[in-house]
Image: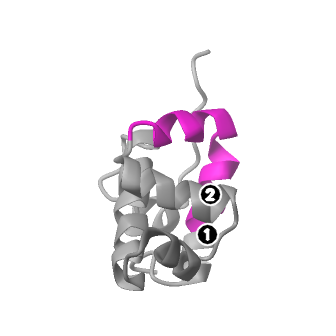
Amino acid sequence: MLAFNSPKARKEFWDKLNKDHSTKDILKALDSVEAIDAGVLRRHYIDNIPLPDIALELGRSASTTRWYHHRGMYRLVAILYPELDSPFDLIHKNLKKAPSNK
């Protein structure tokens, strides 16, 4: 997997985020992502709206909407996993979230 280009790849990343982080932590991290990108992620993953339908809602092309998704996922992973060099390390290295010091 080299990108978030397939529904399978997108689901794999989102499932990993949800396995490692609470919904509250993911939503908090989304607040730090650019609004358009965070909106696409919320509509797609939380509201279960397909990306082509989100594109229609936004009045944007499907490719632009996928770009918002891609960029948002990169930023979200960078916030939630600051130790990674690349978001794809999350899957390729099968990293486990370090225990928090709460």
Is residue 12 placed above or below 73 in the rendered structure? below
Where is residue 27? Give x, y as percent: 57, 39
Q: Nearer the viewer, residue 45 or 6?
A: 45
For the question of whether residue 22 can be seen, the reply is: no
Q: Nearer the viewer, residue 92 or 30?
A: 30
Is residue 60 placed above or below 27 in the rendered structure? below
Residue holding disc 2: 16
Residue holding disc 1: 12
Is residue 69 placed above or below 100 in the rendered structure? below
Where is residue 71? Give x, y as percent: 34, 62
Q: Which of 10 and 19 is in front in this view?
A: 10
**Marking on residue 77:** none
Where is residue 100? Give x, y as percent: 58, 25
Q: Is residue 84 magenta?
A: no
For the rendered model, the colour scheme is: one colour
Looking at the rendered structure, the number of numbered marks drawn on it comes to 2
Q: The residue under label 1 is which amino acid type? A: Glu
Where is residue 77? Give x, y as percent: 43, 51
Q: How crowded is mark 1: few (under 14 residues within 10 Å), some or many (20 or more)?
A: some
Q: Left or right of 54: which side holds 33?
A: left
Q: Residue sitting at 42 percent across and 83 percent down?
A: 62
Q: Main secondary structure of the magenta part?
A: helix
Magenta span covers which residues? 12-32
Q: Left or right of 44: which side holds 74?
A: left
Q: The residue under label 2 is which amino acid type? A: Lys
Q: Residue sitting at 38 percent across and 45 percent down?
A: 33
Is residue 7 placed above or below 19 in the rendered structure? below
